[in-house]
Amino acid sequence: MTQFTLVRHGGYAVAGDPALESAVEAIEITDAQVYTVKRAGGLVFLTLAEAVAAEALAGTSGYFSSLRIAGAEIHVPGGQV
């Protein structure tokens, strides 16, 4: 089953572009990665459309976990910790 989550934008996670520090992007995750996302407090989406819709809203709140998927920190919705 294909699933998706939100992570820190690759332009920041990989290239360190400060303009993208709080940006997120939707990525496809494996069944094994679902556990890591949920452990971090991130969200799992069943469709890319749901993930992209959440991506548009994610920049207004939340934080990034120290847990990573594909080298990028998992986005956790809600307030700062």
Image: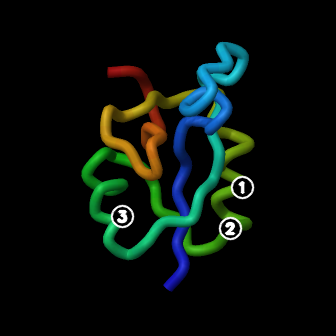
Q: Which one is closest to the eye, mark 3 or mark 1?
A: 3
SS for callout 3: helix
Q: Work out how far the residue at label 3 is from the one at label 1, CA to CA, in angstroms.
A: 19 Å
Q: Report which residue position mark 2 lands on.
A: 48
Location of the C terminus (image quadrant): top left
**Count of marks overlaid on the render:** 3
Please give left or right for residue 63 compared with residue 17 in the image: left
Q: Which mark is residue 33?
A: 3
Q: Which mark is residue 52?
A: 1
Please give left or right for residue 7 compared with residue 34 in the image: right
In the displayed structure, 77 sits above or below 30; it is above
Which residue: 36% across, 54% down? 37
SS for callout 2: helix
- Count residues near mark 2 (Cα–Cα under 10 Å), then give few for <14, some for 14-19, many for 20+: some
In the displayed structure, 50 sits above or below 46; it is above
- Nearer to the camera, 78 or 34: 34
Please give left or right for residue 5 compared with residue 51 in the image: left
Which residue: 49% across, 85% down? 1
